[in-house]
Image (cartoon, rainbow, N blue to C red):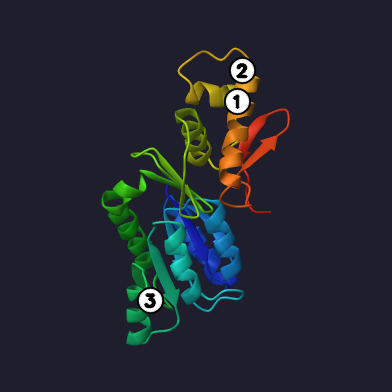
Amino acid sequence: MSRILIIEDDTDINNMMADALKKAGYECTQAFSGTEGLIYIDRDIFSLVVLDLMLPGLDGEDLLPQIKEKQNIPVIVVSAKDSIDSKVGLLTSGAEDYLTKPFDIQEFIARVGVQIRRFAGNEGQDRAHVLSFKEMRIYTDSYEVSVEGTKLDLTKQEFKILELLLTHPNKVFSKQDIYDYAWDDIYIGEDKTINVHISNIRKKIKAVTDDEYIETVWGIGFRLKHTD
């Protein structure tokens, strides 16, 4: 199911868009400020962003390039600004579409569908080979991982562990889950093996950034560490 992030500070408009998108079969996350929207972009993976311009905390024009830098996804700008210069400027800055308020909700849903289908058939093919979380990028076709633009030198198992975690960014994985995915072998309580590999991954990330990416959930396993 396609997941859409709505960044709109007007509660009524935000809720109206979310209700319509859910009825159309989409999963929605609602943010009511630019700052909140950026937190979600850092934390989760989306198929499309609906972006208002006049936002508290961080306005849409400043947020747009940050969204594009962090995730290769379509952005539909929804704004009361209706000048040609505004539209051209936003489209030039990376937005895929621009819808002027007030708008017809059926047209809005149609435009969302167009962009999601377009990315799924074109850019989405490339995006399927890239997993993102915060400043980490995993290129599954070339077996490369980078953090803040710096490539990490990982073993096959270390790569597979990160691939598993980023494929399901909110899930806690047991040590058996991780072993079954990263090793072509039967798990027989290899706790030490998993712990050593997780420790090595953390050290390699630490050499690039102080931000932590892997969280230990005591008694259960490991998951990605989201922004507090």
Label 3 – label 2 distance at C-alpha: 52 Å
In front of the other: label 3 or label 2? Answer: 2
Above or below residue 80? Residue 41 is: above
- Residue visible at 54% across and 70% down in the picture: 8
Quarter holding the C terminus is bottom right
Helix, strand or loop at mark 2: loop
- Callout 3 touching callout 2 (CB < 8 Å): no
Residue 49 visible at all:
no
**Residue at the disc numbered 2:** 190
Considering depth in this image, is 131 or 31 the residue closer to the camera? 131
**Residue at the disc numbered 3:** 90
Provide residue 155's location: percent of width, then percent of height.
Answer: 47, 31
Q: Is residue 168 left or right of residue 117?
A: right
Circle 2 packing at 10 Å, graded few (<14), some (14-19), many (20+), is few
- Callout 2 touching callout 1 (CB < 8 Å): yes
**Residue at the disc numbered 1:** 194
- Residue visible at 58% across and 29% down in the picture: 197
Label 3 – label 1 distance at C-alpha: 46 Å
Considering depth in this image, is 131 or 114 the residue closer to the camera? 131
Choose the circle earlier in sequence order: 3 or 1.
3
Quarter holding the N terminus is top left
Provide residue 53's location: percent of width, then percent of height.
Answer: 49, 76
Residue flagged by tag 3: what amino acid is it?
Leu
